[in-house]
Amino acid sequence: MTKASDVFTLKNSKGVEVTFIARGGQVTGIKVPNTKGEIADVVIGYETTEGALAGDAYFGALCGRYANRIVKGQFELNGETIQLDVNNGPNHLHGGNDGFNMRTWEVEEVELPQFAQAYNLSLVSPDGDQNYPGELTTIVTYGLTEDNEFVIEYDAVSTKDTIINLTSHAYFNLEGAGTGTVAEHELLLNAEKFTPIDGEIGTVTGEISEVKGTGMDFTSAKKIGETLTADCPQVKLVDGIDHNFVINGYDGSLKLAARLEHKGAGRTMEVYTDQPGVQIYTGSHFDGSEKGKLGAPIEKWAGVALETQIFPDSPNKANFPNATLKAEEHYKHTCVYKFI
Ligand code: BGC
């Protein structure tokens, strides 16, 4: 049996190291060399496992059963109204108070030819967990390739029709955790559209809007700081970016979602996914009151999360991709964080 505080590390021969703990499958560190071979830890978080267990439980964590927000925690399935646990004002966020990020996953090392090292993380969520229908068995594979790709593969199956949207919640800072904000990072998104929000709590309106002419336009690489300080109503609502972007040409195959680069630090990361959306969240709620890596306060905009996903509140939005998982069918999702 795996314990919450058990620590696991994936390594390849290029000096990349991914560390995670069993509680929430939380990725607590990713060490990556830059163009000169200098190593930095590029995910924000705490210096110790005790710190990770006591701190923000979304840092680097697996979120589910439904990542992001479901308005009022309600949706209809097969003609029945389901009321989920509510933990974000009136809404359901990241699976509820006892979401998958709070669970201790069973972890087992596996040998897979495509990976230098890999682990399977598994979790059985009982029927009715946070009021979700069906017993859900989830297996997440964390794999590291010799091409410096940290690959997350999700597979889940339910005993009853249900809804699902799993994601990973690591916040990246390619200059290194604890060195400052992500304002100087350049971001490119393979997204001409995004889903606007309607207030500071960040629930989506249901519209799918063009990024053109708004602070959300990352169709060419630009500094995140330009948007953080832009006179853009959507940015002002959440004091930064906390939005779902619609990946161009979604067809279920693996596509580039985002490219993040810190030129000065000499590190670039590309994100690939087979999902329709990616939530970009610049950590506006950090207020410097917690101490993170390098002993530095975790300040506003200290990292950026790139969470591949189905859209927020899809179960209530007929024009959004379908998040229903039929009984005994498999939910599949791949996310690749590639360091260059
Ligand atoms: C959401 C934010 C939320 C945060 C909590 C993100 O995925 O987009 O709105 O505050 O998770 O850690």
Image (tube, rainbow, N blue to C red):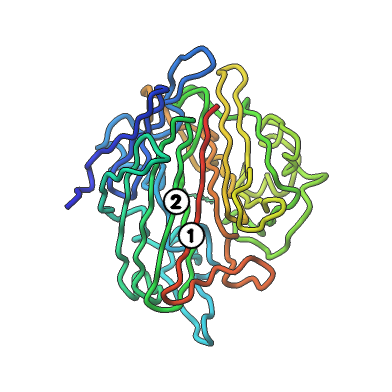
- The quarter in which the C terminus is drawn is top right
- Residue 316 point in image, percent of width and height: 60, 72
Amino acid at pointer 1: Lys
Query: Which residue is label 1 attached to?
Result: 332
Crowd tier of the residue under label 2, counting other residues whose Cα lies within 10 Å: few below 14, some 14–19, many 20 or above:
some
27 w.r.t. 47: above or below: below
Crowd tier of the residue under label 1, counting other residues whose Cα lies within 10 Å: few below 14, some 14–19, many 20 or above:
some
**SS class of the residue under badge 1?**
strand
Residue 318 appears left or right of 119: right
Mark 1 and mark 2 residues within 8 Å of each other at the beta carbon? yes
102 w.r.t. 229: above or below: below
Question: Residue at left 50%, top 51%?
Answer: 334
- Residue 109 point in image, percent of width and height: 27, 44
Q: Earlier in the sequence, mark 1 or mark 2?
A: 2
140 w.r.t. 232: above or below: below
- Residue 106 point in image, percent of width and height: 25, 53
Amino acid at pointer 2: Glu
| Residue most extreme to the right | 213
